[in-house]
Image (tube, coloured by chain):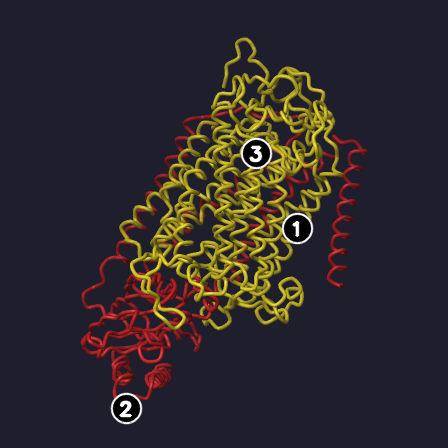
Amino acid sequence: MSGFISILLTGLVFVIIYQIAKASEYATILRGEGKINARVNRTMALLLVLFFVLGIYGIWLCHDALIDKMLPVSASQHGVEYDSMLLVTLVVTGVVFFITQTLLFWFAYRYQSTEKRTSFFFPHNNKLELIWTTVPAIAMAVLVAIGLRNWGKMTGAAPKDATVVEVVGKQFNWIVRYPGKDGVLGKRDFRKINDATNVLGLDWDDKDNKDDIIAQNGELHLVVNKPVSILIGSRDVIHDVGLPHFRMKMDAVPGIVTTLWFTPTITSAKMKEITGNKDFVYEISCDQMCGKGHYSMRGTVIVETQEEYDAWMAKQQTYYAANNAPAAEGTAAPEQKTDSVKAITMK
Amino acid sequence: MSDVIIQGTNVAHTHDAHGGHHGHEHHEQHFITKYIFSQDHKVIAKQFLITGIIWAVIGALMSVFFRLQLGFPNETFPIMEKFLGEWAKGGKLNPEFYYALVTMHGTILVFFVLTAGLSGTFANLLIPLQIGARDMASPFMNMLSYWFFFLSSIIMFVSLFIQTGPASGGWTTYPPLSALKEASLGSGLGMDLWLVSMALFVVSSLLGGLNYISTILNMRTKGMTMTRMPLTIWALLFTAILGVLSFPVLFSGFVLLIFDRNFGTSFYLSEIFIGGKALPHVGGSAILYQHLFWFLGHPEVYIIMLPGMGMASEVLSNHSRKPIFGYSAMIISMIGITVLAFVVWAHHMFVTGMSPFLGSIFVLLTLLIAVPSAVKVFNWLTTIWKGNIRFTVPMMFAIGFVSLFISGGLTGLFLGNSALDIHLHDTYFVIAHFHIVMGVSAFFGMFAGIYHWFPKMFGRFMNNTLGYIHFFITLAGAYLIFWPMHYEGIAGMPRRYYDYSAWESFKQFESLNSFISIAVVLVFFAQLIFVVNFFVSIFRGRKMTTQNPWGSPSLEWTTPINPGHGNWEGDIPEVHRWPYDYKDDGNGNDFISQTTPLKPGEEAH
């Protein structure tokens, strides 16, 4: 009932506003249209300019308020190039933005209707058209050239010495698989998946799988300054491995393997110093809508020195041993261990 | 002369028009055939517009609800429970329904409002009136087009109320999420209804589009050569061509999805383990759907933009009392946009694992499309340069359109460049980009059109005061909402998240999110001002007393004030000149109607 009354009241308010607006309009007509319309016209021209000026000020305020909340310096090699390309594009588009918006609002104000003014009959001019077809085309060519150079670099083949890691998405978490001592990820088959003992469907007939290590808590350990090639897969729907701090992302698509590679350049510990945030952590966000838990599909990346990485790796139990050995204690064991190592790296 | 700025002056017509009433002269029509199952293009236009407005309010209200969640994740809002019931128990939005709202908001605004509501309204209203035809090529098909849309609307509306909720896989409904009932609640019955509704929508869109094209090509009045058509008609022609060529591809994508969902095929599905078991599907490709979807999805962006561009061109020229600058360049740039629109779709898929080489080609083609867009912007700027600008409400919206089109168009250069997209993809930067350019900007084109042609539709004016208020709140609000989102996007904040508070990298934007949500609520109420203005003005607005209130040379203003079915009394007008002759006609008018023959020695444009 109260809902009904509030809707009724809201409606009433709008009708009253309409009536007042209408009355004021009739009043202006009664007072002599010519002058009032000219006045409205002047007012609107002024308001547009005011809007423009306030808008520019607002842009500055917005920038000032948000610049400290942006991402820290890129933690990957190509991310640095990414940032410089972003800056170039920002400058190019920024210049165009300010010129065109200024012209738009300035022309609107400058050429507002007055009794004396007549418009200038100016239907076309091929020279002008030619100029503003060519100039944007050249600007685009430059942006495309920079873009494709970077695109080629970041999507090209990973260096031969790159570590291989697999990241698999499922509703709603990430599973990370390390190849173990042999450096080879064994075969897997979605038909062999079992949530209790074989989360990725590893084929135990493939000996390459025997030494593979699986972290079900979505924690990806990387060695600083060592290129890493990530094989990406999905168990169910499309996900996306988003690595904002490394300026990278790639979809995880069921049925196909996608890849990305990069070289992390700043350790987690160092990044804590840079950002001055002791809770800082590199995060993997799921960037492709995957269902109701999409927003909670979080992984982490730990970038550490080779020694720290080796120390951590030494403590890991292979997934095969954890699940198939006679004395297996279930899947909980490796998770506990990774947690204890995390505590070390945080110090 | 006293009312020159807002009212314009009347036009001396070659045809003696009486104004006043017409509809009842020949035979009385029953209410049902006249207003409901009408075959009159003007009535069908109003039906599309009013349905579109109702959908827009629903879609906008949804955005208010999910913005309340995003802005104030720790608060509860009892009003949401009133509207959403079980889905917002205790005033807290359920995550499942958050995604349903996001999905429906997108579907409704993109398809039902900015496709059907926009080109359905203005193609129907303007094509016959501006080319001098009595009606569409097939008025019956035209009527069917509306009623298929109506049916589609009803099914989509019903899907909001079913137990498992409406579709919730995003407006793009990517499989496998949308194909598997196990993947989400909304992928159950809600998704089936979504697909049926959208299939009917495609039928409606095709019936309409074929009609628009054949009408424009075949039914132009004597003297109305293609190069004498107003730019609105050119824009609507290209819109229809885009729709007719790309909607069938979307339809095929939907049919395959229906097969995968219901008949055990594996077009999109492969190697999936979900709900505790491995599915038998092998060999399909989830990416195939994305190709089919975006083959429509990208031209769809221009289906939404082109009518606004056409109307803004018309309104800018008319209210500047100056011909549109570069008429031919405008047409050529629209041809460029139309052709390129078909070959840029995969720029939505740079990070799907598609071949990087293919990606490079799409980068090139995508940035190429910026060139005709830039030409259009410069032509609009030159159109108002040295004009004699009357700041009527439609003119304000047309200026706003250009401003927003620039702002939103420029960010396309970031996203179209794959090397930048790889970080910005699916972040708030994307939301900011497409909401400004094809959301708000297209809406501004639509508002300009509504305020400009409202007198033609209803014989009355909308209230100016409310129009100005509506304009400034919406323009300022749109920038307040979407400008800061660029920053969130560059910071990597992913879109379609229900809550960011658990993320170390994104939680710093909490206060900004609240700010944006407050702006959303304000802008929503400003739109209600428009809705009230629209509906009340139909019955109570200031009456139109002259045939040609804006002083426009084009044909729609040579019809009587309330034209009946058939538009012109007596013969249809003959056209002698282009539609932008804003020059002294020798009788104190600052324009020359298209129906006025060339003076001796005068050169045609």
Residue type, label 3: Asn
Q: CA distance from mark 2 to mark 1?
A: 68 Å
* Residue under numbered circle 3: B124
Query: Chain drawn yellow, letter?
Result: B
Query: Chain drawn red, letter?
Result: A
Q: Are marks 1 and 3 in contact (CB under 8 Å)?
A: no
Please tell me in which quadrant of the rendered image residue A29 appears: top right
In this rendered view, identify the residue nearer to me: A41 or A201.
A201
Q: Position of residue B347 (x, y in %)?
A: 37, 49
Q: Position of residue B451 (x, y in %)?
A: 64, 38
The residue drawn where x is 54% and y is 55% is B105
- Tell me the mark number nearer the camera, choosing from 1 and 3: 3
The answer to whether residue A201 shows anywhere in this view is yes
For disc 3, the neighbor class at 10 Å (few under 14, some 14 to 19, many from 20) is: many
For disc 1, the neighbor class at 10 Å (few under 14, some 14 to 19, many from 20) is: some
In the rendered structure, the answer to whether residue B80 lies left or right of residue A244 reads right
Q: Which mark is residue A327?
A: 2
Please tell me in which quadrant of the rendered image residue B49 appears: top right
For disc 2, the neighbor class at 10 Å (few under 14, some 14 to 19, many from 20) is: few
In the rendered structure, the answer to whether residue B118 lies left or right of residue B505 reads right
In this rendered view, identify the residue nearer to me: A347 or B558.
B558
Secondary structure of the residue carrying tag 1 is helix
* Residue under numbered circle 1: B526
